[in-house]
Amino acid sequence: MAAEDQDSDQKTEAPSQQRLDEGRKRGQLVATRELATLLLFSVAALACVGLAPASAARLAAIGRALLAEAHRLRLDGDGTTTLLFWLLRETGAALVLPALALLAVPVVAAVLQNAVVWTSEPLQPKFERISPLAGVKRLFSLHALVELAKNLLKILTVGGALGYLLWPERGAMIATSTLAAGPLLDYLADVVLRVLAVLAVLTALIAGLDYGWQWLDFMRKMRMTREEVREELKQNEGDPHVRQRLRALRLERSRRRMMADLPKATMVIVNPTHYAVALRYVAGETPAPRVLAKGVDAVALKIRTLAQEHRIPVIENPPLARALHAACELGEFIPPAHYQAVAEIVSYVLRLDERQRAPNTHPSTHRP
């Protein structure tokens, strides 16, 4: 018991949606049986008002028919079978609608509580279900005590309400022995309807309180320890070390592709040592300059070095280099806001002296 309390104390974290979904698959749901009782009383009351008169009239017609044809009834083998089939058919037709309404109550109650789940988990054998020690623990658990208190409350509440309602009717009930069948049925129907209405109201209150308790108890049972939260995050998002390694691999592959595309660049715009952005623009090929490579610090130095090796003009323009690095991703066209500044650099590159591109010479860093 102490171990169980200790485990409960360690469960300090609210349950995640994944844990709630897993619990639902195992048949662990928030539901109150009092809702089905409420619907049962409500449907019974409605049946008394809407369906009972028609059903009672049809049953009365069956009784009258039996009495009228009593002298013609054959009670031999075939006659009895025929009579029984007729009674079953007519009685079933008279009671089918009230019966269907009452049978639908549990299904409707489950649907309203979103408690319809197909699972075999509750049917699987578990040792604690037959363990005497586990049974004793359940008998004196908080859940059992709450259920006992709830049942006592229901008995006292419903019993008190029915006593308050029916005690004034004790004289009239005794007098019903002198009433004819019609007035007697009308009186009983009125009493039953009032009883069902009172029971429905009381059950609605009890169902609301019980659902609140069931929800609190369910959320308490589904709480998680911090270790369980970490394990779930690790399963959902992967091990942090693995994620870091994968991120590094993706970054390295992206950098290799970027450096492989660098020789296609038309120019490299730099902030002398910290930023470098390689652009490609060929008139008629693209509508605007496209970013082939970019980087800061060591990557920027690598871009500058490769640009010089491939005789690509390196242009110093610190504000533009920083702006393009912040505004553009690899493979994107530069924003229209930078068209004018880049166009001036493109014009400058086109006007560079051809001898700077001659063999055995290396272009230096230029400032247009």
Image (cartoon, rainbow, N blue to C red):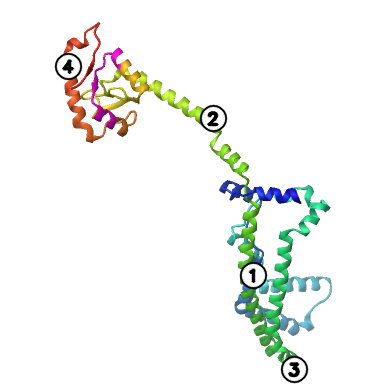
- The residue identified by callout 3 is 178
Q: For this rendering, which residue is in front, 348 or 205?
A: 348
- The residue identified by callout 4 is 352
Mark 3 to mark 4: distance in Å?
123 Å
- Mark 3 against mark 4, which lies toward the viewer? 4
Instruction: Point out the stretch of residues depicted in magenta.
Output: 307-323
- Mark 1 against mark 3, which lies toward the viewer? 1
- Residue 120 appears in the rendering: no
Q: Amino acid at mark 2?
A: Val
> Within 10 Å of the Cα at label 4, are there few (<14), some (14-19), or many (20+) other Cα atoms?
few
- The residue identified by callout 1 is 206
In this picture, residue 75 sits left or right of residue 200: right
Q: Is tag 2's residue or tag 1's residue first in the polypeptide sequence?
A: 1
Q: For numbered disc 3, what is the local secondary structure?
A: helix
Q: Please identify the residue farthest to the top as the structure is shown.
A: 360
Q: For numbered disc 4, what is the local secondary structure?
A: loop
Does the magenta segment cover residue 226?
A: no
Q: Residue at x 58, y 37 (%)?
A: 235
The quadrant of the picture occupied by the C terminus is top left
Against 113, residue 299 (above or below) is above
Mark 2 to mark 3: distance in Å?
88 Å
Residue 128 in the image: x percent, y percent?
Answer: 78, 50
Residue 335 in the image: x percent, y percent?
Answer: 26, 34
Q: Is tag 4's residue or tag 1's residue first in the polypeptide sequence?
A: 1
Q: Residue at x 60, y 67 (%)?
A: 208
Q: Amino acid at mark 4?
A: Leu
Residues at marks 1 and 3 touching, judged by CB atoms closer than 8 Å:
no
For residue 187, what is the image quadrant? Answer: bottom right
- Residue 313 appears in the rendering: yes
Q: Is tag 2's residue or tag 4's residue first in the polypeptide sequence?
A: 2
Q: Amino acid at mark 3?
A: Thr
